Image: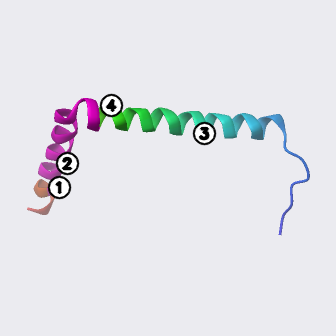
Amino acid sequence: MTHRGRHTKHDDFRGEFLEFLGLVLAVGVFVLFVVRPEAGQALVHTFATTTAGLVH
């Protein structure tokens, strides 16, 4: 079992970066599916046709 005694600045920066990245992804999903629903529908259609092409 490992134990870290102290947090370093590198760990703090990494945590803040991951939090920022998650926020950016959440905003992107919101814009894609709420503001521009046709873009989300096009993405689903493309995914479905690609998957159907792989099955045949």
**Front: mark 1 or 4:** 4
Check if residue 47 falls in the magenta segment.
yes
| Mark 4, secondary structure of its residue | helix
Q: CA distance from mark 1 to mark 4?
A: 25 Å
Q: Which residue is mark 3?
A: 18
**Front: mark 2 or 3:** 3
- Label 2 vs 4, first from the N-terminus: 4
- Label 2 vs 3, first from the N-terminus: 3
Q: Which residue is mark 2?
A: 47
Q: Position of residue 1 (x, y in %)?
A: 83, 69
| Mark 1, secondary structure of its residue | helix
**CB-based contact (under 8 Å), mark 2 and mark 1:** yes
**Front: mark 3 or 1:** 3
Q: CA distance from mark 3 to mark 1?
A: 31 Å
Which residue, as the protein is rendered here, is positioned at the far bottom?
Answer: 1
Q: Nearer the viewer, residue 46 or 33?
A: 33
Residue type at tag 1: Thr
